[in-house]
Structures are given as C-alpha cells and as structure tokens.
C-alpha cells in the first residue's frame, strides 16, 4: 500500500503544542500557511525553505515553492500531476533534497526523480512548468525489479546523500532502498525493509518514510501498516553493505527522520490510530538514541516532514493544515 494513501485521506484541523521532557520549553511559531498539502522540506544557504506541495488531487496543481526567511511564498515549478483515489487519498510530489545547487524531487505517482537548479530562480520570476524539468524514471526500475516480497508497486518517497555522493531513495510501496550512482546514474537495490512483527495479529509492512546518513550508517524511519499499532514502529539502521539491524523501537507511525546537531536522529510521530482514523493533535517530535526515546514536543497535528535549519531550529510540515511551523527545541 503506497504511503501517500495513508497520509492524505482526511482533512484535519490544527492544534496547539505542548512541551514534554526537555530542559527548556520549545518555541513554536507559524512560518507559512495556505499551502496545498505541503510534504517535503529543504533549506538552502540563504535561509530559504523549499517545499513540495502534493496538490489537491482534483487538478494537476502539485508544485515546488520557495519560502523566504520572512515567510513569503513564491511558486517555482507548477503543474505536477496530483491524483486522488476513491478513498480520497492524494498522490503526487513527495520529499526533496538539495545537493549543491541541485534540488532533487521525487514524485510518487510518476515514479520520477526530478532535478531543478535553484540558482535559476529568483523571487518575482514566473514559475516554470513541471514538464520542462529533467527527470529519471526510477519507478520503472523499481517495478521491473524482482523483490523477494514483491508488491509490484512503487512510491518514491524520501532520499538522502550517502557515500561517494550517491543518492539513496526509500520507496514506500516497494519497501526498499534504491541507490543511484552519482557519476553514472545507474540504479541498484541497496537494501529491502523487512516487515514488522505484530504479536498475536500478523506481520505489518514497514512502509519506509525517511532516511538519513550519519557518516557511518543509514537510519530509516517507518510508518507501519494497518492497523497502525502504537509503539510498533522502529528505526532501522543499515551499514555500508546494506545489512540491516534495529537502532531503536517503541515508536509510533513515523513519518520522517532528521539528524540533530549531535547527529542523533530526531523523528516525527504522525499520530495515534483510534480504530476509525488518526486522533487529532496526537503527533510528536521524538529524539532517539541507542539508550531510548525522548519526547520533545507533543500535540502536533499530523506532521509529515521535519528539516533542521540550524543548531536547534526545525521546520515542520503539517500537510492537512497546509502549514509549516518553525520550532526551536
């Protein structure tokens, strides 16, 4: 099941944040609003925030936008495919990554890895068309690959930079990590994400949602499949040969992962499943170490993306609210 199907099924309302288990209360301020399903976040050297918007699902209105440090939103690339399923889920642009001046964007529906040079845009420039961007058909490689547990689906969802500058992309439908060679652009399967054991019920799809490289290993967050049991999500770690082990467990419906200033993972918990849907304002920011998990901020409303911009400052995308929050932890 594609991860977007889980995330984009209901319209939600916003909520307040509460501080838990930290030396000082975090400061949370509204940074941008009025976005259409913001999902991926990236920052540049100028303090600008780049955001992907999945769109409405009723028109091809997915877009890449740039937000100035003052919170002014500029459309950069428009016209990305945005589709809706009978269940009301929206599929389209997912996460993005900046390497030098090249912005990489992954599109789940199309299975494409798009590239865009951020130096080609200045505030006030008219947006360019998505059809004008160069892309690589990574999803075709994924669907053609014979996995042991083959879902026959692809949903390119998130990505990071690893050794030799190669890109490592998590596919939330194939439950795999795809490696793209920085020089040749050749694709290979770096690793697969094992299912999760839900005692007394069944195995669950891991549904990878985020990936980071700390210089020694990859850390991968996962959402877990239906019925989204609390405390069953884990952070997997992969060595440079793609061997998997568990870094930390006891987490719930993880949607993204980032490294803090000490290169320890900080993850987003999407929320608590109540049997009918996810409970409003039950999302959280959690710091995870080899010794345990520490809740830093509670009360988030379905957070989907986290990006650290400085030592203790993070941006959080709340897709259904159409907002981005700036949080200092």
Image: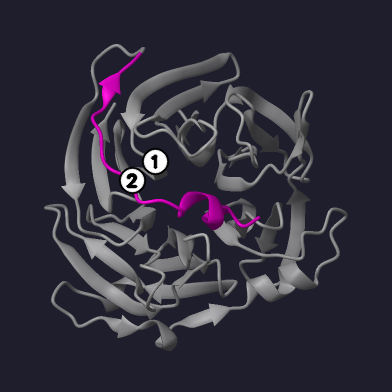
* Residue 287 drawn at (x, y percent): 46, 24
Quadrant position of residue 168: bottom right
Q: In this view, does 186 lie to the left or right of 72?
A: right
Residue 177 circle label: none
Residue nearest the viewer, comparing 1 with 141? 1
Badge 1 element: loop
| Of labels 1 and 2, the one closer to you | 2
**Residue that label 1 marks:** 302
Q: In which quarter of the image is residue 204?
A: top right
Residue 222 in which image quadrant = top right
Image: 200 above or below 81: above
Question: In the image shown, does 82 or 121 lie closer to the viewer?
Answer: 82
190 w.r.t. 257: above or below: below
Q: How crowded is mark 1: few (under 14 residues within 10 Å), some or many (20 or more)?
A: many
Which residue corresponds to the image point at 28% horizontal and 49% vertical from the top-left?
Answer: 321
Dominant secondary structure, magenta: loop
Given residues 27 and 229, the one toward you in this image is 229
Q: Mark 2 points at which residue?
A: 12
Q: Which residue appears farthest toward the bottom when viewing the image?
A: 132
Mark 1 touches mark 2? (CB < 8 Å)? yes
Left or right: where does residue 312 sit relative to residue 84?
left
Q: Say which residue appears at 54% left-offset and 56% top-offset.
A: 5
Measure the alpha-carbon separation of dots 1 and 2.
8 Å
On the image, the x and y values in percent for residue 96 come to: 44, 60
SS state under label 2: loop
Earlier-in-chain disc, 1 versus 2: 2
For image coordinates 76% across by 45% down, the residue present is 242
Range covered by the magenta-colored residues: 1-20
Above or below: residue 23 compared with residue 75: above
Please rate how many residues cluster around mark 2, counting C-alpha atoms within 10 Å: few if below 14, some from 14 to 19, many from 20: some
Query: Is residue 15 covered in magenta?
Result: yes
Where residue 260 sits: x, y (%)? 42, 32
């Amino acid at each position: 099941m594609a991860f977007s199907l889980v995330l984009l099924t209901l319209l939600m309302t916003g909520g307040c944040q509460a501080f838990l288990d930290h030396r000082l209360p975090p400061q949370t301020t509204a940074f941008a609003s009025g976005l259409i399903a913001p999902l991926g976040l990236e920052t540049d050297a100028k303090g600008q925030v780049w955001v992907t918007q999945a769109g409405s699902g009723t028109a091809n209105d997915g877009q890449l936008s740039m937000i100035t440090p003052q919170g002014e939103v500029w459309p950069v690339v428009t016209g990305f495919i945005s589709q809706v399923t009978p269940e009301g889920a929206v599929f389209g642009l997912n996460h993005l990554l900046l390497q030098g001046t090249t912005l990489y964007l992954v599109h789940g529906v199309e299975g494409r890895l798009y590239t865009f040079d951020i130096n080609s845009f200045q505030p006030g420039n008219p947006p360019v068309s998505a059809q004008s961007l160069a892309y690589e058909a990574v999803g075709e490689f994924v669907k053609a690959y014979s996995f042991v547990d083959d879902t026959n689906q692809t949903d390119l969802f998130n990505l990071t930079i690893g050794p030799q500058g190669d890109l490592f992309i998590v596919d939330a439908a194939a439950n795999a990590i795809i490696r793209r060679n920085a020089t040749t652009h050749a694709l290979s399967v770096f690793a697969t994400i094992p299912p999760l054991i839900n005692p007394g019920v069944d195995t669950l799809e891991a549904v990878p949602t985020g990936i980071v490289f700390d210089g020694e290993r990859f850390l991968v967050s996962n959402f877990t499949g239906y019925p989204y049991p609390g405390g069953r999500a884990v952070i997997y770690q992969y060595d440079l040969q793609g061997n998997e082990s568990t870094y930390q467990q006891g987490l719930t419906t993880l949607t993204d992962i980032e490294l803090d200033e000490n290169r320890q993972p900080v993850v987003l918990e999407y929320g608590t499943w109540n049997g009918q849907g996810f409970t409003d304002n039950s999302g959280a920011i959690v710091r995870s170490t080899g010794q345990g998990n520490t809740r830093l901020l509670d009360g988030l409303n379905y957070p989907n993306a986290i990006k650290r911009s400085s030592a203790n400052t993070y941006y959080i995308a709340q897709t259904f609210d159409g907002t981005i929050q700036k949080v200092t932890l």
